[in-house]
Amino acid sequence: MEQPMALLAQIDGLGRDARRGGYSRPVHSPAENELREWFIAAAEQRGLLVETDRNGILWAWWGHPGPNAVVTGSHLDSVPGGGAYDGPLGVASALSAIDLMRRRGQQPGRPLAVAVFPEEEGSRFGVACMGSRLLSGAISPDKARNLTDAEGNTLSDVYRANGIAPEHLGEDRERLAGIRQFVELHIEQGRGQVDLGAAVAVGGSILGHGRWRLSFRGQGNHAGTTLMSDRADPMVAAAQAVVAVRRIAAGRSGARGTVGRLSPIPGGTNVIASRVDVWVDVRHRADAVTASIVEELYASATAIAAAEGCTATLTEESLSPTVHFDAGLAGELGAVLGQVPVLESGAGHDAGVLAARIPTAMLFVRNPTGVSHAPEEQIDAPDADAGAVALADVLAHLSNAGESS
Ligand code: GLV
Ligand code: MN
Ligand code: MN
């Protein structure tokens, strides 16, 4: 078997970000396109049949494409300045698992595919899990086509320039009907497995999460000539809103509230901004709590804005309800793997989106730093090997299990 770390070493140089540290691999950037090429070459070297579907998802088939297929895979895009493993570990481990099954002489009794999902992070067009959302109909193709990146390019134009016809984006019932089960292996993004001393874990659920844009509008003006008493400064409102996110989320047990990005317009040192956009990420295992946090935040932002002579508007950019993975499939993984813990994931995954349409499961591999979406994300080679072995065991079982299982 080519080990996951050896495969990841082949892509180590792609998308390194000297300014932020780590990797910046937004969908269809030169780096992400090179990663896709790397995947296609690695899959073809293994005799897999590679296709790109109409939503830009790569599928590498061992055996004839569908029906009744078992699918594994993950993503190759990253957040800005992200780690090496969030996404690529699942793709590399899938290839390793196929190598291992072959070395053991295990032949899948039904089609087996490795899928690579585009724009999982939503770091270019703002909506996470774009590939799996389009495939499963969780986002309308019209909404997707009109999303823009930071340079103002539409998703439609970017996809077209990369060989994906935007008019054909959208729910693919035929493809979904051909998938029996989906299993995504992923680096654990918190400290769960470190604390439990477990190299491998099974996913039980994913916290519901969403992204909102708070836009504060005031009066753009001159930093030197505008008296402090004459200002309607949306930056001052935005700063208070950031603190309000922390306060409101900290007041609800188990909630997470984050502002990781804000953008002042026009954004000059000697310019009072006319508008500031603040992106807020809120998560909780109870969807009603997520909704109430956002409601309280909007009320607070409106009051903050009024006190500063500004206005506030709130726009939902994406929302993913809490997901509980298929209990029967998780049970099968548990039976194959023995004593492995079941984890709740605070991070979102394509597996969470697909779970609405297909029996879906996840495997997690221990992250010794517990840090993710940052360069300090880490995997130890023996854990990566253990993850690939676990995935091979699971795939060998699922691709041969009887129809009744
Ligand atoms: C993706 O990793 C997310 O949880 O936002
Ligand atoms: Mn990921
Ligand atoms: Mn991520």
Image (cartoon, rainbow, N blue to C red):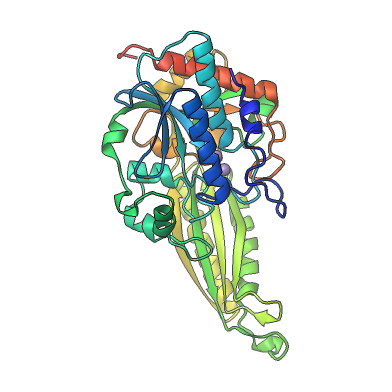
Picture residue at 51% right of the left edge, 62% below the top: 213
Q: Which x, y percent locates residue 274?
A: 57, 79
Residue 179: percent from the left, percent from the top?
A: 33, 28
Residue 154, placed above or below residue 257 = below
Q: In the image shown, does 364 or 227 lie closer to the viewer?
A: 364
Above or below for 347 versus 67: below
- Residue 335: percent from left, percent from top: 48, 13
**Residue 184 visible in this rendered orientation of the protein:** no
Quadrant (top left, top right, bottom left, bottom right) of the C terminus = top left
The correct choice, above or below, for 337 with respect to 206 in the image is: above
- Residue at the location (49% across, 39% down)? 349
Percent x, y for residue 194?
Answer: 69, 28
Residue extending farthest left: 174
- The one nearer the camera, 276 or 382, is 382
Q: Quadrant of residue 271?
A: bottom right
Kindly tell me whether residue 373 is visible in this rendering.
Answer: yes
Instruction: Give the quadrant of residue 111.
Output: top left
The front one of 219 and 149 is 149
